[in-house]
Image (spheres, rainbow, N blue to C red):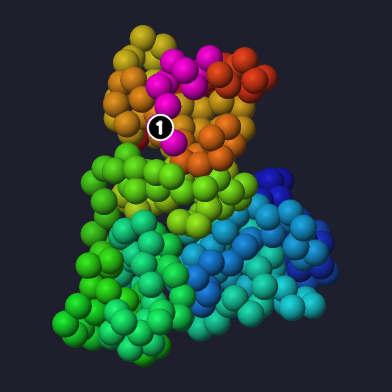
């Protein structure tokens, strides 16, 4: 294993299971933690200049090192490795529910007229401890509208339906949430919430998700089309949904138009089509 994105080692420290495989000054088991903020950037390096991905509230991680206010972590959802601000991490209990709508709000009391304290993205993982009229109470005493949560053990049945929840969300390189998302973040949100394991970047997804389609197989809802550095999902036999820099948003686009446009812009042809 040599892919930096998936290798929990940085020269100074490495995960204990990598002893004898990679060189490091220390080998550690790491400590479990979770994201306590609505969203946390996952950086390629501790200087926080190159965002790789984002983690959402309730996502669990393993911390291998703390340095200058940053934590070197591995995300449990997909094995992605990087640096997160220490202030974004804390002790969290296991989730009972996820935010199952495009976005929600976190309230200090169960009252929609009270100013919320945070905005939550689809996919945020929360532990519910009680219910009242219209609201769920969370383990930390805050509240979320009941219609916005879905049991964590009840996956969606249609990944394309999940992708469509993000229609119009602004494009954000490395984004994974309702305030900004990129092509691979959109596909990952759709697949993981539907019970399908999914890596974090499109090149990793291309080699791991579903099966490769034969050239003569017609496109179906939920199929994935890959280009060099890009991925889109079919909503039917003719239309794709994807987060893309051309529209700077999650948008619908006829597959034939997208294929021609991307190739004309230098992105090359479709490299693979895959089906779950």
Question: Is the stretch drawn in magenta largely helix, strand or loop?
Answer: helix
54, above or below 2, in the image = below
Q: On the rendered structure, is 162 left or right of 5?
A: left
Tell me: residue 39, above or below residue 52.
below
Q: Position of residue 225 (x, y in %)?
A: 46, 27
In the displayed structure, does residue 100 sit left or right of residue 51? Answer: left
The percent coordinates of residue 212 (x first, y second) are: 42, 24
Residue found at the very far top of the displayed protein? 216
Q: Is residue 17 visible?
A: no
Q: Position of residue 273 (x, y in %)?
A: 44, 23
Residue extending furthest left?
133
Residue 202 location, quadrant = top right
Which stretch is magenta? 251-260
Mark 1, Cα crowd under 10 Å, few <14 / some 14-19 / many 20+, is many
Left or right of 14, for residue 107: left
Q: Does the magenta segment cover residue 150?
A: no
Towards the viewer: 131 or 18: 131
Identified at 40% across, 22% down, the residue is 254
Which residue is found at the position 32% from the left and 76% from the top?
144
Helix, strand or loop at label 1? It is: strand
The residue beneath circle 1 is 252
Query: Where does the image place residue 21, in percent across and percent down from the top left?
Result: 73, 55
Q: Eyeballing the image, is 121 above or below 5?
A: below
Please tell me whether residue 37 is drawn above or below residue 48 in the rendered image: below
- The residue that appears at 44% across and 15% down in the rendered structure is 256
Picture residue at 23% right of the left edge, 86% below the top: 130
- Which quarter of the image is occupied by the C terminus? top left
């Amino acid at each position: 294993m040599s892919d930096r994105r998936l290798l929990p080692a940085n020269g100074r420290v490495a995960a204990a299971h990598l002893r004898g495989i990679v060189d490091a000054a220390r080998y550690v088991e790491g400590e479990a933690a979770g994201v306590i903020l609505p969203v946390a950037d996952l950086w390629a390096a501790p200087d926080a200049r190159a965002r790789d991905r984002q983690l959402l509230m309730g996502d669990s991680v393993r911390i291998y090192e703390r340095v200058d206010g940053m934590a070197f972590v591995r995300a449990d959802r997909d094995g992605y490795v990087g640096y997160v601000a220490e202030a974004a991490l804390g002790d969290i209990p296991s989730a009972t529910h996820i935010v199952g709508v495009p976005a929600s709000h976190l309230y200090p009391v169960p009252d929609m007229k009270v100013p919320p304290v945070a905005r939550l993205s689809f996919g945020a993982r929360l532990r519910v401890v009680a219910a009242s009229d219209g609201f769920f109470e969370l383990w930390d005493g805050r509240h979320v509208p009941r219609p916005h949560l879905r049991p964590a053990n009840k996956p969606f049945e249609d990944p394309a339906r999940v992708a469509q929840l993000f229609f119009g969300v602004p494009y954000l390189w490395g984004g994974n949430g309702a305030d900004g998302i990129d092509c691979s973040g959109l596909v990952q949100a759709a697949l993981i919430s539907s019970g399908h394991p999914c890596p974090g970047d499109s090149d990793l997804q291309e080699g791991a998700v579903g099966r490769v389609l034969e050239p003569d197989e017609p496109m179906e809802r939920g199929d994935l089309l890959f280009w060099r550095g890009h991925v889109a999902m079919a909503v039917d036999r003719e239309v794709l949904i994807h987060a893309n820099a051309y529209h700077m948003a999650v948008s619908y686009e006829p597959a034939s138009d997208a294929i021609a446009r991307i190739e004309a812009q230098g992105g090359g042809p479709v490299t693979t089509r895959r089906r779950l």
